[in-house]
Image: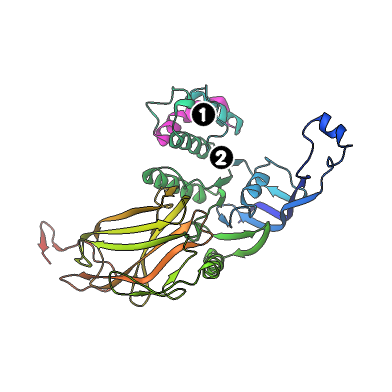
């Protein structure tokens, strides 16, 4: 398999100036031209090496300020490296800031043509693909309106649609699934998978470790501009998650014992972790903690904060008594990029039906810092519930099902 991206010893630095640098010629003259020269170099990336083959997706993870977006800018030739080299083979398509290149007074149609032509498609080819671009973006009724009248989601859909219809051999994507509705996210994922199968090399920057683990063939973990780990996504994601857990444990303060409504004691760094900047004060499983398989379940979380938090992520996992994971969901991955926390509030996750096998399970709940840096509060194996089912099957799923005996001319249903 041919190499589409080769990065060797890549580094990028910026000049760092005095905090009281003169802003005008007059200030510079009065200060005797002092504090004009840079103080030192700030390295945001250094010693970064990796390669991405055609038809391969590499995920880049790391906390804010790790250098992820700078790396994409260098790969997309928006910026130039200070040291090292980058070799790319094929046309590069970049989704570094969805819709950033659009002109607000131009219509969606005009912006689509301009963006696609800049990406390297002849005007005639853009015209031939235009209907597909609009159909994918779901903007039939708005494509001739000025882009300044578009919502953020509409601009995102148009930008993504144009980018994936320009036949890039290399695609650079910065958090493209963090916004938009779930249906469009699924469409984006399917299109990305098709591009991989067609031989496109993809570099994806994401805060969602589970997403990288699920979608990517390799993973790169950046920390303060340097590579911490590079290789199999499950291994890299596991190392990254472990560091986050350790940091959460370090930030977890001493706290007097508390009891849940179920009578379970919350013990710091045993079944409760987090900085407690935001606390989960109660969890309710409705209509009750014992339901039939395939029945609805609502999980309500009450929380309180000591001061407002601009953005947080809520998570819920369902696990068995032995710790085996059955489900892992969070607000960010389900299309809710920003939840602002006031002093007190409630958030609810609604399962229209929960098709689990008979047995005892736990609902594990958490509130996380927006960049997944650490947990504000996380409760593990504290909230039990039971699933009843009339028929026992192996595994954890108990979906609606029936057996049918099929002959040449009839199908006899066997009701279970």
Q: Which residues are magenta?
A: 120-138
- Colouring rule applied to residues: rainbow
* Quarter in which the C terminus is drawn: bottom left
Residue drawn where x is 24% and y is 70% of the image: 357
Relative to the observer, which residue lies in front, 399 or 249? Answer: 249
Q: Left or right: where does residue 152 sit relative to residue 296?
A: right
Q: In x, y percent, where is residue 393? A: 23, 73
- Does the magenta stretch mainly form a helix, a strand or a loop? helix
* Quarter in which the N terminus is drawn: bottom right
Q: In x, y percent, where is residue 88? A: 67, 47
Q: Nearer the viewer, mark 2 or mark 1?
A: 2
Q: Is residue 298 above or below residue 168?
A: below
Q: In x, y percent, where is residue 219? A: 57, 60
Relative to the observer, which residue lies in front, 169 or 78? Answer: 78
Q: Left or right: where does residue 223 sit relative to residue 400?
A: right
Relative to the observer, which residue lies in front, 28 or 373? Answer: 28
Residue lying at the far bottom in this picture: please name it.
Answer: 322
Residue carrying label 1: 112
Instruction: Sort mark 1 into few (<14), some (14-19) or many (20+) by Cα contacts within 10 Å.
Output: many
- The disc at residue 290 is none
The secondary element bearing badge 1 is classed as: helix
Q: In x, y percent, where is residue 390? A: 15, 71
The secondary element bearing badge 2 is classed as: loop
Q: Is residue 242 above or below residue 196?
A: below
Q: Left or right: where does residue 80 sit relative to residue 3?
A: right
Verify whether residue 72 appears in magenta.
Answer: no
- The disc at residue 97 is 2
């Amino acid at each position: 398999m041919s190499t589409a991206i080769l990065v060797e010893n890549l580094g990028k630095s910026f000049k760092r100036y005095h905090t009281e640098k003169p802003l005008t010629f007059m200030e510079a003259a009065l200060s005797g031209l002092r504090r004009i020269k840079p103080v030192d170099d700030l390295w945001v990336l250094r010693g970064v090496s990796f390669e991405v083959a055609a038809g391969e997706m590499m995920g880049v993870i790391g906390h804010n300020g790790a250098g992820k977006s700078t790396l994409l800018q260098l790969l997309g030739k928006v910026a130039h490296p200070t040291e090292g080299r980058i070799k790319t083979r094929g046309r590069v398509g970049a989704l570094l800031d969805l819709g950033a290149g659009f002109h607000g007074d131009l219509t969606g149609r005009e912006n689509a043509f301009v963006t696609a032509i800049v990406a390297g498609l002849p005007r005639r080819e853009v015209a031939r693909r235009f209907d597909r671009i609009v159909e994918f973006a779901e903007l039939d009724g708005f494509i001739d309106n000025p882009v300044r009248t578009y919502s953020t989601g509409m601009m995102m859909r148009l930008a993504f649609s144009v980018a994936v219809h320009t036949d890039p051999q290399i695609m650079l994507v910065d958090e493209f699934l963090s916004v938009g509705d779930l249906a469009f996210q699924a469409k984006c994922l399917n299109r990305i998978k098709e591009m991989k199968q067609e031989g496109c090399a993809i570099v994806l920057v994401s805060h969602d470790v589970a997403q990288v683990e699920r979608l990517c063939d390799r993973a790169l973990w950046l920390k303060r501009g340097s590579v911490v780990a590079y290789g199999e996504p499950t291994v890299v994601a596991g190392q990254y998650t472990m560091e986050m857990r350790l940091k959460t444990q370090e930030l977890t303060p001493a706290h007097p014992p508390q009891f849940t409504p179920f009578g379970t004691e919350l013990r710091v760094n045993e079944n409760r972790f987090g900085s407690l900047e935001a606390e989960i004060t109660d969890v309710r499983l409705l209509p009750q903690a014992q339901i039939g398989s395939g029945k609805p379940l609502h999980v309500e979380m009450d929380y309180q904060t000591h001061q407002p938090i601009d953005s947080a992520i809520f998570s819920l996992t369902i696990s068995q008594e032995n710790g085996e994971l059955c489900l892992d969901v969070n607000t960010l991955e389900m299309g809710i990029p920003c939840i602002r926390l006031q002093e007190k509030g409630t958030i609810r996750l609604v399962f229209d039906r929960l098709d689990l096998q008979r047995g005892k399970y736990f609902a594990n709940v958490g509130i996380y810092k927006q960049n997944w840096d650490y947990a504000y509060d996380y409760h593990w194996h504290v909230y039990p519930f039971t699933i009843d089912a009339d028929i026992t099957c192996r595994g954890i799923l108990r979906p609606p099902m029936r057996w049918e005996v099929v002959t040449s001319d009839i199908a006899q249903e066997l009701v279970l």
